[in-house]
Image (spheres, grey):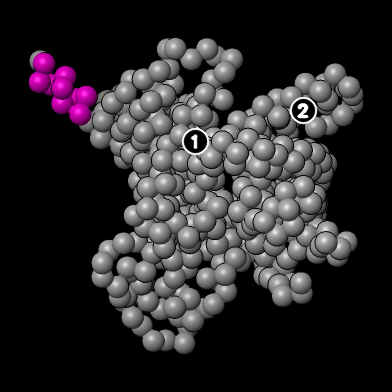
Amino acid sequence: MAQAKAKKKDLGYLANLTKGFIKENPIFTFMLGLCPALAVTGTVETSLGMGLLVIFVLVSSNVVVSLIKDFIPAEVKIPSYIVIISTFVTMVGLLTEAYAPALFDSLGIFIPLIVVNCLILGRAESYASKNNVLNSAIDGLGMGLGFLGAMVLIGFFREFFSTGAIAYGVYLPLAVEGSIVNLEWYILNIAVLAGPAGGFLVIGLLLGLFNSIAITKRNKKERERQKMIEEKKRLALERKRKKAMESAGGKA
Amino acid sequence: MSWTVFFVAIFSSMLINNVVLMRFLGVCPFIGVSKKTNSAIGMSMAVLFVMVVASLVSYLLYYLVLVPLNIEYVQTIGFILIIASLVQLVEMFIKKVSKKLYKSLGVYLPLITTNCAILGVAVANISEDFADQYGVFPGLAVAVTTAFGAALGFGLIMFAFSTIRERLEAAVIPEAWKGVPISLITAGIMALAFAGLGGIV
């Protein structure tokens, strides 16, 4: 009995972790944190770096908010969350400056701006202020991973279609430098995608693509349901007819 | 320091380094509040007011408090607290002074705390070292002018984008692309147009 209960709880944790990946993806379904998603996704590495920073801040602020949620008066809720978040953002900024200076330079103003990333404040307000510490940490990790995945996807499209390669070791301190998937093809040279307009275009195109996939899926499901209903109707009608015929035969 | 400095500051922060299209600040209200021209104008007015005052106060905080005390690293915390309390103060002030203005701006004010354009411009004013270039107080004037230009640029883009979106409502668009996707692509094309202005100043 206890084991079954524990198992059920584990599944709950897993669902809590994975809900941010696709179904509640912060960028593609809630449009939260669009500013960094547009600004620092020029390359896969900067998107990855930004995603990691956001995961760190999100998990830590969720944990702290959920720890002290009972002590914060409701009137100063938002300011206290902002102070907690900006403390972690300051820490993360100083750490990045020390250990990954190239990343710090390329993210620039968007490191302090993690404070006003609506994703983090949103999770603190809507999840961490109502749930226990472990669940809040898992929620932060899952949402952060969903954010990271979306960032890397956008970064991949922008870097791949503008240079034809994915560079590594340029911004993150990996000790090796190089690039993968080197392709020389005239189509993979769309410089626009690396520039400011590229962010808007790539996110817009990806969103449209995801929407059309979702709509096709929904239509397919709808059609299947319609089919099933018709099949059932047909069967019922047949049965009725059979019964009627039988009773008619009995009378005769 | 001549007057051209101010002209260049307004022109470059309004058109060339446009907050929304070139620096990606304040994209959330740009997408969220631009469905109707009226609300776009209301939001832009609120941003104009808060951005100028926030830049002024955060600049003074940085150079008169943080630098003498040698605690520049609390910049982010200090600025966001100032902006949050300023927004609250502005809301109360407007409510007291003009009911009419409060009706038109009041809804947008709480949203401004998490508008990254405000914090972004305040931080950028510090990191661009106006104080080193012109001295602390002339630098303050340049910083405030820059903030004014940035807010004007925000308003310009909000207005243009909201008029485009009103037209888009009536256009025939495939179902999957309705709403945000087509707006983002429109914004991308606008960003391309604005990229053409680069290099004027």
Q: Quadrant of residue B8?
A: bottom right
* Prevailing secondary structure of the magenta residues: helix
Residue A32 placement, left or right of A47? right
State whether residue A234 appears in this view: no
Quadrant of the image containing the N terminus of chain B: bottom right
Residue type for callout 2: Val
Could one spot residue A202 in this view of the protein? yes
Instruction: Same chain for labels 2 and 1? Say yes or no.
Output: no
Packing grade of label 1 (10 A; few <14, some 14-19, many >=20) is many
For marks 2 and 1, give the CA distance. 23 Å
Position in image of residue B93 (x %, y %): 81, 23
Q: Is residue A233 left or right of residue B132?
A: left
Q: Which quadrant of the structure image shows residue B6? A: bottom right
Along the line of sight, which residue is nearer the eye, A50 or A213? Answer: A50
Helix, strand or loop status at disc 2: helix
Q: Secondary structure at mark 1?
A: helix
Q: Which residues are magenta?
A: A2-10
Chain under disc 1: A
Q: Is residue A133 above or below residue B24?
A: above
Is residue B115 located in the magenta-colored stretch of the structure? no
Q: Position of residue A150 (x, y in %)?
A: 42, 53
Q: Residue at x 42, y 24 (%)?
A: A65
Up/down of A214 relative to A115, above or below:
below
**Would residue B174 be found to the left or right of residue A211 on screen?**
right
| Residue at the image position 74 percent from the left and 57 percent from the top | B134
At a point 46% along the width and 41% down the height, the residue shown is: A90
Disc 2: which residue: B90
Q: Which residue is mark 1?
A: A86
